[in-house]
Image: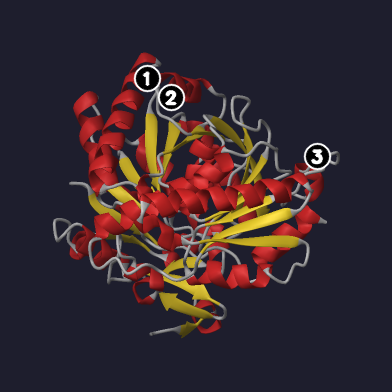
């Protein structure tokens, strides 16, 4: 594996511009934007950087109309499409793009789509953004000039430098194509350079040589005229790669972006969570505490559900085991191969969880760490993964007692538990309990209204972060 010492890379990057100047320029441009920002999130972790923003778990016309009516410039729609087949993903995105276009026209409101996805480049790309483009252009008189790629996510250690996307592991920077994420059975890839990645994922329909690169040198020197002009030259839905290692880089880019938008350009966005915070004008907020989240009168235990199988999650589970006041129950994923054994396993785990919560004990349910050998059939692997997640979801759905909190670990797991296990139609993002780890307050129509629901991405945090969160809430 190719790795680079992070310190060696970062010391070569130009110094940041004056933060007050950038903040002032950005605030002025955001006032001119006047577009509703609709974020389609392919799993629930995309609210990692925002607070006091609505998340809708369906895309009915009523929900989308409510989102457009809100005072906030932005709202999220949780599609959970990373857990869908390609056919399901296409159908959902056609439905959403059609309804959003209709509501926007009825409200005489311009809008932008952000396709928020994984900062390690997994997901149904380019399918999702191409379907959105196709439908919006067919339903409205708009035309997309290009697509912005910005997978930077500081809280998770994801940085783009000289067009190469890196994942930080301890003190090392690893090119994304060298990581375990690039070997994903469903969404794997080879390229770490985002221009090459775009060409790879589009099967050569969009060439790396046609990509527009927004450099760190220009961002850090506030070369706004040059960046704006670069954006004005983009056409034919070619790609724009935004280099970024800190939020200031995204802020400077957004200043130039809004200037290009004001001159008639239109872009689709494929991004991680950083862009939503800046383009949505979301302020900084301190991390949430136990006092913010937990009812002091609560007598039941908390519930931690771990479905993710990435290496970091397993390391975090090992650290969590150091807490003596937490009960651990393993869910045997091998049971998924038979409907009968799956039902029996689900009943066994549900019974044990209910008993623990009632006596005030916090309990962790985790899927067994060994992976099933599913061969090379990507769709079958995804469908079995969804089946396991459904069984985990059923445990929450059948809870007779209200936990004092729920933590869900992993994208598919957290989405299924939120939408199906807790029946959340709309939630409010409270903020983050640790960097990159968002918390929902569940809506009034959910199974447990106003429950603090912590959405813990599988690939975020240090080895000790999950233990620290549970210890904080359980003290």
For numbered disc 3, what is the local secondary structure? loop
Q: Alpha-carbon distance for marks 3 and 1?
A: 39 Å
Sequence-first disc among 1 and 2: 2
Do residues under tags 1 and 2 come within 8 Å of each other at their CB atoms? Answer: yes
* Residue that mark 3 sits on: 295
Visual colour scheme: secondary structure
Residue at 38%, 35% in the rendered image: 112
Sequence-first disc among 3 and 1: 1
Residue at 23%, 62% in the rendered image: 377
Q: Is residue 447 above or below residue 253?
A: above
Side of 192 relative to 72 (left or right): left
Residue at 66%, 30% in the rendered image: 449
> Can you tell which mark lies on residue 64?
2
How far from the left and from the top, in percent, is residue 338? 36, 54
How far from the left and from the top, in percent, is residue 101? 32, 25
Q: Alpha-carbon distance for marks 3 and 2?
A: 32 Å
Select label 1 or label 2 by which is in front.
2
How far from the left and from the top, in percent, is residue 396? 58, 43
Q: Quadrant of residue 401?
A: top right
How far from the left and from the top, in percent, is residue 27? 57, 40
Q: Alpha-carbon distance for marks 1 and 2?
A: 7 Å
Number of marks in the rendered image: 3
* Local crowd size for mark 1, using a 10 Å CA cut-off: few (<14), some (14–19), many (≥20): some
For numbered disc 1, what is the local secondary structure? helix
* Local crowd size for mark 3, using a 10 Å CA cut-off: few (<14), some (14–19), many (≥20): few
> Can you tell which mark lies on residue 103?
1
Sequence-first disc among 3 and 2: 2
Q: Residue 144 or 265: which is nearer the viewer?
A: 144
Side of 217 relative to 438 (left or right): left
């Amino acid at each position: 594996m190719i790795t680079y010492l992070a310190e060696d890379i970062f010391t070569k990057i130009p110094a940041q511009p004056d933060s007050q100047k950038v903040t002032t320029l950005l605030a002025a441009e955001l006032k001119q934007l006047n577009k509703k920002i609709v974020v389609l999130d392919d799993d629930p972790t995309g609210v990692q950087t925002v607070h006091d923003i609505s998340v809708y778990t369906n895309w009915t016309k009523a929900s989308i109309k409510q989102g457009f009516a809100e005072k906030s410039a932005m709202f999220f729609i949780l599609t959970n499409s990373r857990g869908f087949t390609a056919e399901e993903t296409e159908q959902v995105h056609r439905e959403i793009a059609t309804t959003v276009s209709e509501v926007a026209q009825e409200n005489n409101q311009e809008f932008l789509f952000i396709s928020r996805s994984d900062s390690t480049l997994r997901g149904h790309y380019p399918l999702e953004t191409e379907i959105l483009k196709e439908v919006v252009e067919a339903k409205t008189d708009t035309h997309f000039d290009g697509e912005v790629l910005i997978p930077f996510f500081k809280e998770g250690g994801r940085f783009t430098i000289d067009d190469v996307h890196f994942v930080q592991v301890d003190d090392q920077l690893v090119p994304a194509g060298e990581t375990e994420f690039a070997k994903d059975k469903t969404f794997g890839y080879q390229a770490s350079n985002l221009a090459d990645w775009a060409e790879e994922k589009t099967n050569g329909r969009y060439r790396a040589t046609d990509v527009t690169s927004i450099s760190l040198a220009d961002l850090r020197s506030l070369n706004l005229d040059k960046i704006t002009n670069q954006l004005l030259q983009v056409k034919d839905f070619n790609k724009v790669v935004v280099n970024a290692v800190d939020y200031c880089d995204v802020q400077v880019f957004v200043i130039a972006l809004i200037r290009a938008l004001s001159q008639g350009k239109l872009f689709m966005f494929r991004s991680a969570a950083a862009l939503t915070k800046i383009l949505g004008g979301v302020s900084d907020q301190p991390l949430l505490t136990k006092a913010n989240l937990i009812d002091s009168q609560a007598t039941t235990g908390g519930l931690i559900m771990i479905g993710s199988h990435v290496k970091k999650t397993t390391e975090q589970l090992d650290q969590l085991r150091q807490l003596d006041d937490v009960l651990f129950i393993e869910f045997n994923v091998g049971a998924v191969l038979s409907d009968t054994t799956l039902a029996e396993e689900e009943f066994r785990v549900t019974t044990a969880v209910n008993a623990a919560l009632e006596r005030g004990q916090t309990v962790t349910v985790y899927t067994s760490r060994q992976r099933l050998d599913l061969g090379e059939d990507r769709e079958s692997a995804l469908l079995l993964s969804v089946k396991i997640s459904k069984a985990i979801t059923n445990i929450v759905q059948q809870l007779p007692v209200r936990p004092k909190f729920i933590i869900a670990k992993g994208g598919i797991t957290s989405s299924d538990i939120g939408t199906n296990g807790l029946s959340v139609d709309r939630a409010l993002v409270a903020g983050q309990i640790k960097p990159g780890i968002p918390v929902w307050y569940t809506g009034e129509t959910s199974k447990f209204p106003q429950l603090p629901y912590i959405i813990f991405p599988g690939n975020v945090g240090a080895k000790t972060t999950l233990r620290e969160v549970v210890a904080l809430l359980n003290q």
